[in-house]
Image (tube, rainbow, N blue to C red):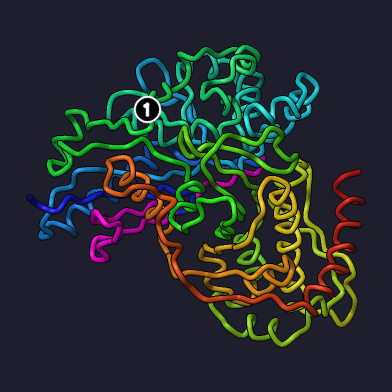
Amino acid sequence: MKTPLILVLDIGTSSVRAALYDSSANVLPATMVKHERRLTATDDGGAEIDALEALAQIETAIDDVLKKSAKIKGEIRYVAASSFWHSLVGVDKRGKLTTKIFGWADTRSRKYVAALRNEFNETTIHNRTGARFHSSFWTAKLLWLRKDFPKVYARTDCWLSFSDFAALKFFGEAATGVSMASATGIFDIRRNDWDAELLEFLEIKKENLPAVVAEDARTFRLNKKYSERWARLKNAEWFAAIGDGAANNIGAGCTVKSKAALMIGTSGAMRVAFKGEPPETIPSGLWCYRIDRRRIIVGGALSDGGGLYYWLKDNLRLKQDDDQTEAAIKRRGADAHGLTFLPFLAGERGTGYHEAAHGGIFGLHSSTDTIDIVQAALESVAYRFAEIYNQLNDVVKIREIIASGGALRESPVWTQIIADVLAQNMSLPDTREASSRGAVLLALEAIGAIKSIEKIDTPTGRKFKFDKKRNAIYKIARERHEEFYQLLICK
């Protein structure tokens, strides 16, 4: 029998990756492809991309993998995927697009967050859906579209995540898994169904949303059009996509309560995944989604992560790939600059969910230099992670943190700062495709190739041990940071 292979798609906001994996979750390096892209930023706060262009990028990635693997023996039996959470796109009754894809960073619906908070008890909704009211979720986006674009809203027959749109095109049916549905903000994570009260308020029916697969292990087959395009995939079984954050946790080996995954890519997140049901009360600054019907993932997200670092380097005229900035920060002491930086250039998600938040720098003086500002910014992101870390520890007891993401791999200094602020040792494995690996592992569990994703070893990597003296300094600096936060954000 030929060795079964798995094609994996990692559909992100900034790139589409694809590769073949074997049945032991090992990537075949020669098959890896990556196509970068950017969501279009609009002057009024939009972050969008054309759905057909995004679909074409997936198609091209698959084309490229099949071409690069033409001489590799083995049948591609399965296709697994991870996809970015919180996207929204509309189609009419014929499956034609009615909107662009709106990404999580699209803030044009922010003016309707207050209306949602006036209409509902946000704590009740948060505990039921796992999501606060915020422009990153469907609640605000759908209300914005209904109020500001009534003709578009009326013409739209089905509202989808981007991965659901791809499923509609590839399989001929709009279907989603609980992982993607649970991050929309209109899904009851305890009942595993769309939230009836929110749907009534938004004036949509279940028929206007993708069907939630009844079984996590359900698979799909390509329709005639794509079976002819990809003959090697015509018999392959496609799993419903899972959220990129869930896939990242699995790929990083963080699937038990004691292990947290801390990721910094363009944005940032800290998450704990485990078997069981959502906590009875979800801490106010955290979200709670599902990996599948047996597992949940709890965490917090920051809108500013690696994107903030790149923005600083660009605007302060520092070379993006220059190690001199890292070396300069490393030579300086913790909080040596005396600055307070509020890292909200892209607004605030966790833990305060303040839609109108803006960034700021306080304490500037004539001797302040560019390295001071960059260091203060990196430390400020660590302080925001500390807020998430504290709330996560109200749900679980974290004993180990596994770091990931391109921004941290490129900046060990930043990784060390976070470890010092959290007073928590961390490891940074060289697992560059954690989300892809996570999607593969969950698929292998579904087909019985592995017993449990919880039994998979955590990848080893570079160790970062926190320093008690620096932590003591950061405790004081964090108090100063919190004072400015309360003054300018919360009042």
Residue nearest the viewer, comparing 79 with 340: 79
Query: What residue lies at 17% left-to-right and 50% top-to-bottom?
Result: 4
Residue nearest the viewer, comparing 397 with 198: 397
The answer to whether 250 is drawn above or below residue 207 in the figure is below
Query: What residue lies at 45% left-to-right and 52% top-to-bottom?
Result: 250
Decide if residue 165 is on the left or right side of residue 278: left
Q: Residue furthest left?
A: 1
Is residue 171 magenta-colored?
Answer: no
The answer to whether 320 is drawn above or below residue 402 in the figure is below
Q: Which residues are magenta?
A: 15-44
Is residue 21 magenta-colored?
Answer: yes
Which residue is tagged 1? 215
Residue nearest the viewer, comparing 399 with 231: 399
| Circle 1 SS class | loop
Decide if residue 141 is on the left or right side of residue 81: right
Residue type marked 1: Glu
Quadrant of res 369: bottom right
The answer to whether 249 is drawn above or below residue 402 in the figure is above
Q: Position of residue 308 (x, y in %)?
A: 65, 61
Q: Residue furthest bottom?
A: 331
Q: Is residue 88 visible?
A: yes
Dot 1, how many residues are within 10 Å of its Cα: few (below 14), some (14-19), or many (20+)? few
